[in-house]
Amino acid sequence: MDRVQRSIEKFEGALGKFRELVEGSLLPSLLREDILVEVGSKRFEYTYEAMWKALKEVLRSRGIECYSPKGCLQEGLKEGLVPEEWEETLAQMVKLRNELVHIYDEERARRLYKEISRTQVLQAFQRVLDNLKKAIATGEEEK
């Protein structure tokens, strides 16, 4: 299995775990709110990191280099891997991820968790994943 495929599978696995937490009914009911916020924030962060790294690998296979999440999202947008209708949501996700990494206030953490738990965040992740999988299935990653 090559790097591109591995990175996409890692993204898909991370998204599955994040979705399970956000959409599932059992786990949230078993966890205290503060633990749910911490776990949810970590799963979001891991999914976000896996997304941009998978995007980076697909872009690299097309001869396009990017070195940061924001740069990879911009290049992914140009290449059609990031859907235009999700550009604003993904830009907001960059901001949320950066805030989550440096958060020490519980109230702020709860507010951010509510933001990352929105359906739009899951849908944006899913659309990028679908586009990456489609690109490698059709051989488009090697333009």
Image (cartoon, helix red, strand yellow):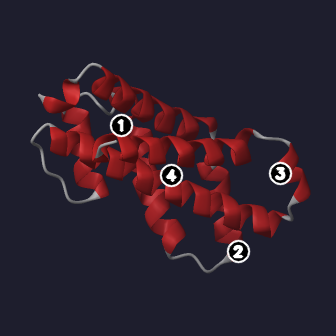
Which residue extends farthest bottom? Answer: 104
**Mark 1: which secondary structure?**
helix
Front position among marks 4 and 2: 4
- As rendered, which of 68 and 62 lies closer to the eye? 62
Residue that numbered label 2 is attached to: 106
- Residue denoted by label 1: 87
Q: Earlier in the sequence, mark 1 or mark 3?
A: 3
Check disc 3: other Cα within 10 Å, few if <14, some if 14-19, many if 20+.
few
For badge 1, the amino acid type reads Glu
Is residue 97 at least partly visible in the picture? yes
Q: Which residue is mark 4?
A: 47
Identify residue for label 3.
Answer: 27
Q: Is residue 42 left or right of residue 135?
A: right
Amino acid found under the numbered disc labelled 4: Thr
Which residue occupies the extreme right position in the image? Answer: 30
Q: Position of residue 68 (x, y in %)?
A: 25, 59
Q: Count the labels in the image.
A: 4
Q: Earlier in the sequence, mark 3 or mark 2?
A: 3
